[in-house]
């Protein structure tokens, strides 16, 4: 398989020059994914939107949540961990990828409370 790109649908994509996801062989990297397309300020709803975008990007390159081996979750408020973790668990509860939750100072859009990235390994 040759390298396959999933375009990012984001106001920042053209400026930064990045893809939502890249598959090279069995490996898939999904870029940090913000809750684009939702007006909700609820961290659970934002995380669900992030994970929907991640799942759709995986599907575009022939992968699925079951293939995810690592996630990174970026929060602007550590108190949101449980709500965001609940959304993460709804997608990855049985998969149990290696996962890290990192509290950061902020994200590009001040209304975003969470951003999620993922790495997958597609079976041969």
Image (spheres, grey):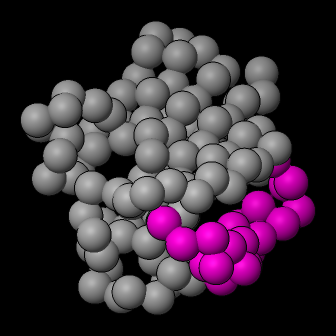
The quadrant in which residue 31 appears is top left
Relative image position of residue 28 (x, y in whole percent): 58, 30
Q: Is residue 80 left or right of residue 76?
A: right
Q: Is residue 94 left or right of residue 32?
A: right
Q: Main secondary structure of the magenta part?
A: helix
Q: Does 94 lie within the magenta span?
A: yes
Relative image position of residue 49 (x, y in whole percent): 45, 72
Q: Does 11 lie within the magenta span?
A: no
Q: Identify the residue at horizontal 77%, vertical 70% (top origin).
A: 89
Q: Identify the residue at horizontal 85%, vertical 54% (top origin).
A: 95
Q: Please state the extent of the stretch shown in magenta in the rendering.
A: 76-97
Using the image, determine if residue 4 lies above or below residue 112.
above
Relative image position of residue 113 (x, y in whole percent): 44, 72
Single out the residue that lies furthest toward the top.
Answer: 2
Q: Is residue 26 left or right of residue 48?
A: right
Q: Nearer the viewer, residue 39 or 22?
A: 39
Whether residue 101 appears in this view of the structure is yes
Using the image, determine if residue 92 lies above or below residue 79.
above
Q: Identify the residue at horizontal 21%, vertical 52% (top origin).
A: 10
The quadrant in which residue 51 appears is bottom right
Q: Identify the residue at horizontal 88%, vertical 62% (top origin).
A: 94
């Amino acid at each position: 398989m040759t390298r396959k790109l999933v375009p990012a649908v984001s106001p920042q994509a053209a400026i930064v020059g990045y893809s939502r996801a890249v598959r090279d062989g069995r490996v898939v990297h999904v870029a940090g994914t913000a809750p684009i397309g939702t007006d909700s300020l609820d961290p659970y709803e934002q995380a669900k939107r992030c994970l929907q975008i991640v799942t759709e990007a995986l599907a575009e390159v022939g992968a699925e949540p079951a293939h995810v081996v690592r996630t990174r979750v970026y929060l602007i408020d550590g108190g949101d961990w449980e709500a965001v973790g609940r959304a993460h668990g709804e997608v990855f509860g049985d998969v149990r990828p290696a996962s890290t939750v990192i509290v950061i100072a902020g994200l590009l859009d001040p209304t975003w409370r969470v951003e999620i990235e993922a790495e997958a390994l597609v079976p041969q």
